[in-house]
Structure formats: structure tokens, C-alpha cells
Image (spheres, grey):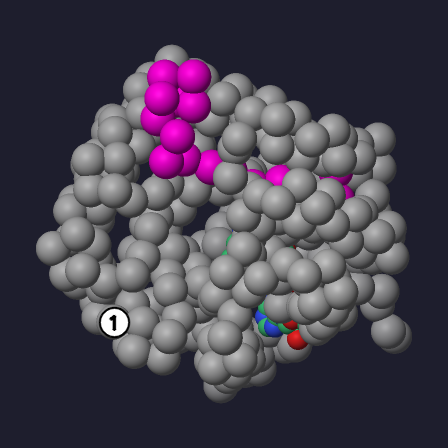
Amino acid sequence: MKIGTELYRKTLLTVSGNPLVEKLTLRYGKSLARKFIAASDLEGAIEEVKKLNSKGIMATLDHLGEGITKLDQALSYRNEYIRLIKAIAESRVEANVSLKPTQMGLALDKEIGYEHIRAVVREAKYHRNFVRIDMEDSPYTDATLEIVWKLHKEQLTNVGTVIQAYLYRSEQDVEDCIDQGIPLRLVKGAYKESSSIAYQNTKDVLWQYKRIIQMHLDHHVYTAIASHDDKIIRWTKQYALEHDIPKDRFEFQMLYGLRMQDQVKLAEEGYRVRCYVPYGTMWYPYYTRRLAEKPANLMMVLKNMGR
Ligand code: FAD
């Protein structure tokens, strides 16, 4: 039976919360997860970034972790990010950082989460670097946007966030962020959201995605388009060409391990390309979102279980 892409995605994101599925994936999926995870430690991740840089590809480094259950975990993630920012400066690689707000404690204590993120952004500012706050699922959308706006009001402008095309609210959020001068990464959206707040249909998501990319480019603000979708990449290139938008006014972003040849090709064509490079040991939630995006990835895990 052929399962529709959206149904597959929703089903997988639901079952990935099941402890047995988690246990099986941790057991059988580890070697396959390596395709998407650059390294288990910081030193290995910096080496991977050097390789990417040598191909003309920039990076954003993500120390894996999200949805922590104790606040002292947030403190250790904050310290790891500070170590990461220093390592980027010392090794002079072309990279910034991406972090998850729940990794910094947002779900447990908003104020403490804010303070940890602020400390990371301040460290990045000292080293003239940039912090991208990834967008997680919808319970955190408002809080994430509030954090970024608050930091900008404190003159910490080296921080931006992400807007997900699948949320109905996103057009308004993009408009508000443009007004506030918040740098954005634009994505389709990776979480399971209900039809009361998000488009469920691929066509609708694509339509709104193009709409927010266009809004962003039309406002002459630097735009990060994070997608592996050929339709989106072709459309963006064409739109930029027709509207005299120079190649240095936007960048394409893709995930480590995905379409690497295309990343190199885009860089060779003179486009700015940034690869999202995750590292660390807490790979399960990140990996299941990648499985949810493509049925073939799940088939690989299932085949491996049979071996
Ligand atoms: P799709 O239509 O899903 O993919 C297009 C094609 O790309 C597929 O046909 C396939 O060939 C290939 N492809 C895509 N995904 C996979 C995969 N997992 N394995 C193998 N091939 C694949 N989402 C958030 O909600 N918040 C974020 O902060 C966030 N940050 C992101 C940062 C980056 C750099 C990227 C690239 C994505 C990020 N995402 C984030 C994920 C995003 O929302 C989508 O879930 C994801 O990019 C898949 O959508 P797509 O636009 O690539 O198109």
C-alpha cells in the first residue's frame, strides 16, 4: 500500500515518542544515524567543517540536545556552546552556531532559558559570530520569538531565528521579524502540528514557503532558505535572477549528510551555501525527524534490523 507522504510523516513523528521504538532505533539505527551526524565530539565536528569550508561551504554547528528534563543539563549545554564558539574562533573555520531553546531550559524555566541563551549570544558577539535559535514545535513559537526580540532590544543583534512555512501564523511572523530586523532562516517545518494551526497539505506548505521567501527577498533583507527541495531552490534562483537580487543577499542551507553533491554544486555556481552540522551523542530526536522526512530512510533502518 502506498502511504501518502504527509500521513507517513505524521505517523512516524507520533510513533517516535514510543519508548520501544526509541529503544529499537537506538540499538539498530546508530550506524545509519552517522550519515546525518558529523561527529560525536566538538573536535571531530570542527574537522568536518574544515572539509566543508575547503569546498566553499559554510557551516552552522549544532550541539545535539533538546527537551531536557533537569536545569543543570541546560547549564552544561550553555557551557558546551561557549566552548564551541571559542573553538570556532580559534580554528578560524567559517561557521556560526544553531541551538535549540528547550536545550537551554526554555520548557522548564523561561527566565533561566533566556539567561543561558543570552550568555551564548554574548560570547558569540565577543567573537563576532552569530547564533541561530532553531524553531521547535508550536508550544515554543511565541517564547522563542520573544527571546530573540528581547535580545535585539538589548543590542544583541547577532542572533536570529527560524520561521516554519507550515504554520498559518508565519506570514505575520515574517512581517514582524522584518520590521524588527531579526535575521531569519526559512524552512517548511519539521514537527507534527495540528490542522488548527498548520497546513497539512504539501501544496499549501509549498505555497506559503514561496510566499515568505518572496516577502523576505522583496524587503532586501539577507535571507536563509533551508531546504533540499529542488522546486524551492530552482524557484529561488529564478526569482533572484528576475528581480536583480545578487547572490550575496541570500544563502541556501542544507543538512549535513543530505544532498552533499548539490551543496558543492551550488557553491561552485557562486551561491552562498551553509551546511547544518550536528554533533554529539543525543541524536535520537534529530534523527527521527530526518526519518520522518523520507520513507527510504526508515526502510534502511528496518533492513538493518533484519541483519
Ligand atoms: P522535502 O520535500 O522534505 O525534501 C525534498 C527532497 O530532499 C526529498 O525528496 C529528498 O530527496 C531530500 N530529503 C529531504 N529530507 C530528507 C531526509 N531526511 N533524508 C533523505 N533525503 C531527504 N525545521 C524546523 O521545524 N525548525 C528548524 O529550526 C529547522 N532548521 C533547519 C535547518 C536546515 C539547514 C534545514 C535544511 C532544515 C531545517 N528544518 C527545520 C527542517 C525543515 O523544516 C524540513 O523538515 C526539512 O528541510 C525537509 O523539507 P525540505 O524543504 O528539505 O523538502
Is residue 94 in the magenta section? no
- Apparent side of residue 261 relative to residue 51 in the rendered image (left or right): right
User: Can I make out residue 172 in this image?
Assistant: yes
Q: Residue at x 80, y 35 (%)?
A: 168
Three-letter code for the amino acid on which mark 1 is drawn? Lys
In the image, residue 223 sits, relative to residue 245, either above or below, namely above
What percent of the width, then of the height, locates residue 290?
Answer: 57, 62
In the image, residue 169 sits, relative to residue 23, either above or below, namely above
Disc 1 residue crowd, few under 14, some 14–19, many 20+, Cα 10 Å: some
Q: Which residues are magenta?
A: 151-167
User: Which of the two residues, 2 or 147, is positioned nearer the viewer here?
Assistant: 147
Residue that protrudes farthest toward the left in the picture:
90
Residue 176 occupies which quadrant of the picture? top right
- Apparent side of residue 123 relative to residue 175 in the rendered image (left or right): left
User: Which of the two residues, 207 or 104, is positioned nearer the viewer here?
Assistant: 207
Quadrant of ligand 1 in image: bottom right
Residue that protrudes farthest toward the top in the picture:
111
What percent of the width, then of the height, locates residue 106?
Answer: 43, 24
For label 1, the residue is: 50
In the image, residue 275 sits, relative to residue 66, either above or below, namely below
Q: Residue at x 70, y 67 (%)?
A: 241
Q: Residue at x 33, y 51 (%)?
A: 96
User: Can I make out residue 100 in this image?
Assistant: no
What percent of the width, then of the height, locates residue 135?
Answer: 55, 39
